[in-house]
Amino acid sequence: MTKTLSLRGLASAAVLLGAALVATTAAAQPKKDTAVLGMALEPPGLDPTAGAASAIAEIVLYNVFETLTKIGSDGSTAPLLARRWTVSPDLRTWTFSLRAGVKFHNGQPCDAAAVKFSFERAADKASPNKDRATFANIERIDTPDPLTVVLALKNPNPDLLFQLGQATAVIVEPTSAATNATQPVGTGPYRLEGWARGSSVTLARWDGWRDAKDVALRRVTIRFISDAAAQVAALLSGDVDAFPRVAAARSLPMFQGNRKFQVLVGGSRAKTILAINNKRKPLDDVRVRRAIAAAIDRRAVIDGSADGYGVPIGSYLVPGAPGYVDLTAVNAYDPAKARALLRQAGVALPLQLTMKLPPVAYARQGGEIIAAMLAQVGIEAKIENVEWAQWLSGVYGQKAYDLTVISHVEPLDFGNFARPNYYWGYESPAFNALWARIQATPQPAERNRLMADAQKLVAEDAVAAYLYQPTLITVANARLQGLWKDMPLFVNDLAALRWQ
């Protein structure tokens, strides 16, 4: 009996000793404080007020630059640089109270003067800000004291709080604003540490941030990987810890069955479209554009280019957005109708067009499928694969294209149809008048009714072939916490990430 008790005691002692050694080893190892994220596209610069690429915001929004409000993954808005606000009943006068003591990375104060400078800069007629219309609607900016900003609007704007949380509304430091594309200076929790062009961007935690003690990751590297197979390989090898919006639909089973990974499947407000250059003949004929739309089987495009992860759309708004109406029956898949419309338009077949595709999987794969469908109705779409910088300069900037496949990810960009000289080349006095009415209407019910009319108009005008609302996939290391599942806008909130 004594011998048995002694053996048990030795076993217990061994267990306690082992636990102590494990605890000592764990305590000796520092908690992981770095991470590597993947992104499909490299931005042309890092100033979100000077470029259209959503990849800019994916790096800098809420990380390097901050806004008055912050948009959450559920689409809600919360205070950020503004700690509170009030609005007049007519939604035309907005008063923001700013956080005290906030400084830019270069030590300059972030105050009412900086906000006024940022918004007036965005509203300038020469501004390249893609949301310039939001700021041009500001009639006057008053700064009664260093921590108060009063915006007097020309038209009521019930969406203002959301718009002021987008990347185009970042607050910039006046003396450094001109060089933000390569040397961004903001108020956020991270600073640019390095940019290896063609490879990666590295951000380092800024210890001067007001809540720096709550930022778990000391350094984050964002790698640019456009090829879908390479994205999957980087995750499997551990070279990348997380890949938001990854092109891994076909490979999901290998991640979903592996406890090392987490898979987040969420919604978006993005619209994937076949953009059409409305200025080029014969694409300036609505019958030709309707023929192109009718030649495309949206479901087949979703299955072939997004592996079924998408929802068909018939106009430039997606399910879940305020005022959405289902218009998929307009310009529905009907090859016979497409051929008839081309005959009515007097188009000599085969009609030869070019289709320029950026280097993202959904565009390259979707473009091949669409080209095959167009060929069935007598349209020969010659595919030209271009790099992202070429797409931005040639297609978006110079409008040197016939067709292109692209996702517009901004949730409140319906006003693009009213933008003069936009890359679609769409000019419609009827739409412009309707959009002006929408902008002047504060009542939600009436605004939604007018938005339904706007959706019908751009669907009937076939400004583009509206394809689908993407369902977004994020694959990440199972221990990395704080990632967004749903994405009302494309952003990587790095300060929210931490290792379990």
Image (cartoon, rainbow, N blue to C red):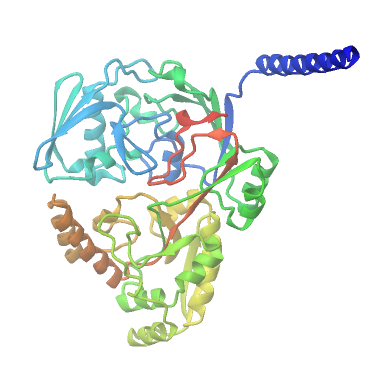
**Percent of width and height locating residue 449:** 18, 61
Residue drawn at 79 percent across, 13 percent down? 13
Q: Nearer the viewer, residue 4 or 136?
A: 4
Q: Nearer the viewer, residue 121 or 188?
A: 188
Residue drawn at 43 percent across, 66 percent down? 403
**Percent of width and height locating residue 63:** 43, 30
**In this rendering, position of residue 307 left or right of residue 137:** right
Q: Is residue 474 above or below residue 80?
A: below
The number of numbered discs placed on residues in the rendered structure image is 0
Q: Nearer the viewer, residue 334 or 256?
A: 256
Q: Nearer the viewer, residue 88 or 135?
A: 88
Q: Is residue 274 above or below residue 493?
A: below
Residue 239 appearing in the image: yes
Residue drawn at 48 percent across, 70 percent down? 299
The picture quadrant where one finds residue 69 is: top left
Residue 196 appearing in the image: no
Furthest residue in direction front, as rendered: 1
